Image (spheres, rainbow, N blue to C red):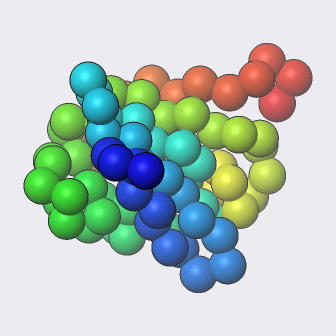
Amino acid sequence: MPNVYSVSLGSVNAFLIDTDGLTLIDTGTEGSADAILDAIREIGRRPEDLDCILVTHCHADHAGSLAELKRATGVEAHMHPLD
């Protein structure tokens, strides 16, 4: 699928969607932020290009690096209100 990039984070994946803006789906486990920021650069974008983080559910393997990525980019995160 064009403009959708899988970011392998060991036992889980995150995804970057590069369309009108740059969206990250899930943040992997704690300590995955550097790998995600590197992946953003590898697709020719900058971390400050990130517009949105979507978390599929609030488990440590999907949201573990959320705080670190929010600090690094200042971007808002979104998830279901029950999470």
Report the residue that reaches farthest toward the front. Answer: 1
Most foreground residue, 20 or 72: 20
The answer to whether one can see residue 74 in this image is no
**Is the residue 9 above or below the residue 73 in the image?**
below
Q: Residue furthest right?
A: 82
At x 67% / y 79%, what residue is drawn?
11
The structure residue drawn at horizontal position 45% and vertical position 43%, both measured from the top left corner, is 24
Q: Is residue 22 above or below residue 43?
A: above
Identify which residue is drawn at 46% across, 62% down: 6
Q: Position of residue 53 (x, y in %)?
A: 48, 35
**5 relative to 66, above or below:** below
Depth check, front residue: 65 or 55: 55
What quarter of the picture does the C terminus occupy? top right
Left or right: where 38 falls relative to 16: left
| Residue 61 x %, y % | 71, 62
**Residue 18: x percent and y percent?**
30, 39
> Relative to the observer, which residue lies in front, 82 or 67?
82
Q: Position of residue 39 (x, y in %)?
A: 30, 64
The residue depicted at 50 percent of the width and 73 percent of the height is 8
Q: Is residue 24 visible?
A: yes
Figure disc tally: 0
Using the rendered view, name the quadrant where residue 76 is placed: top left
Residue 65 left/right relative to 76: right
Say which quarter of the image contains residue 44: bottom left
Taking the view exactly as shown, the residue that stands out farthest to the bottom is 10
